[in-house]
Image (cartoon, rainbow, N blue to C red):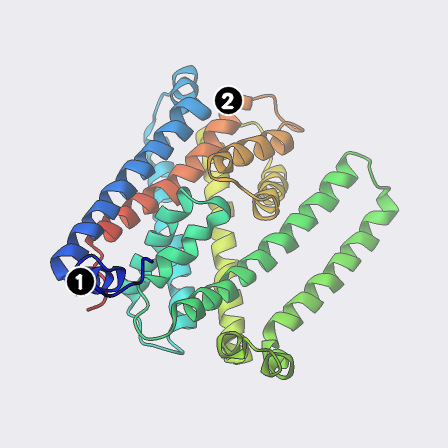
Amino acid sequence: MFYRDDGLFSFGKLKQTVISNPKTIHKILNIVKLILVAVTFGFLYYKLVHAYHLNQLVHTFDFQLKNSDVNILLVAFVLAAVNIMLESSKWRLLVNRFESVSFKQAIKAVCAGMTLSIITPNQIGDFAGRVLYIRKMGKLNGALVTVIGHTAQVLITVAFGLMSYIWFAGEQNIIRAEQITLYYIALLILVALSIYAYLNLKQLQPWIQKSRFKRYLEVFYGYSRGELLEILIMAFLRWTVVNIEFILLVHFFDIDVSTREVFACVNATLLVQTLVPSFILLDLGIRGASALWFFGAFTNQPDSVLLMTYSIWVINIFAPGMLGLYYLLRWKPEA
């Protein structure tokens, strides 16, 4: 009965009136933005203060900032900016095959995605935030293109994460010394096959052409090997930047572990974060718990490890997420 069109209050006319009225759209958009701000800050406050007690951790840690410490923090923030620029370049390269996106637009899209990923499970909001800045290509195609970039990042993270697990297993005598080489060789073969498959996405074309969803899935074989290799290289550079950030913050918080142990712990932690599903409020907790598990094998400084892990989150997620929130508040739908 809601679709009857025989009066002033018919659903069809009401819907048409709402959609065609710019003032109504503007009001609805402003309400959505206010809700977004409230939800974002509410989640952040709950995560940092109530759920994970970051304020208490800060009070328990004896901060005595020296000039070298300030420099470490500055370099970490600069590297976070480099990280965002690399991810923006990666996404822009993928999207530009279908429509022209400026580097500034790409940064806005990536930061907006980070904002929404904070308040959504499994970073679903990352896809939603980015497609807001797509004008010509379909939103679903835009999300699928983003999957290609994420897949490259997952390949790099899983490769080095599994390498770290093998090293841990050897250190903890879970596997024998003579087995370690075999595990590394098996991992090398697996990684090589995975990279080969990624660089040859065009081979999916015969199967996609038979699918009823081919109009959407065609994006997966639209890139050359050179373009996909460039995406993979940028993913590797992002992985490098994150590892350097961890090493810097290990020094900042005076965590007594060697560089080799940092490398293993960080990449094992990143693998857990990549493979374990996160459900909104648990994401930061998974980061802290996994870091404690691996770093705890080499040091008895749980507070410092947690502060380091949460600081990485603040620098790499929270800070660009706040910039993304600003972009979202200024975002206007396409006319």
Location of residue 267 by image quarter = top right
> Which residue is at 48% across, 44% downward?
121
Q: Is residue 188 left or right of residue 42?
A: right
Identify which residue, 162 or 52, lies in the foreground.
52
**Which tag is nearer the camera, tag 2 or tag 1?**
1
Question: How many neighbours does mark 2 have within 10 angstroms: few (below 14), some (14-19), or many (20 or more)?
Answer: some
Location of residue 314 by image quarter = top left
Task: Determine whether 249 is above or below 98 in the image.
Answer: above
> Which residue is at 61% across, 47% downward?
275
The residue pinned by badge 1 equals 17
Amino acid type for the residue under numbered disc 2: Asp
> Are dots 2 and 1 in contact, CB under 8 Å?
no
Residue 223 pos. (x, y %):
50, 79
Quadrant in which the N terminus is drawn = bottom left
Residue 181 pos. (x, y %):
81, 52
Q: Is residue 242 left or right of residue 84?
A: right
> Which residue is at 20% across, 56% downward?
9
Question: How many neighbours does mark 1 have within 10 angstroms: few (below 14), some (14-19), or many (20 or more)?
Answer: few
Q: Is any part of residue 254 visible from this angle?
A: no
Residue 272 pos. (x, y %):
61, 43
Identify which residue, 257 or 22, lies in the foreground.
22
Task: Determine whether 334 is above or below 294 in the image.
Answer: below
Which circle marks residue 303 in the picture?
A: 2
Amino acid type for the residue under numbered disc 1: Thr
- Compare marks 2 and 1 and give the one earlier in the sequence: 1
Task: Determine whether 217 is above or below 64 in the image.
Answer: below
Q: Secondary structure at mark 1?
A: helix
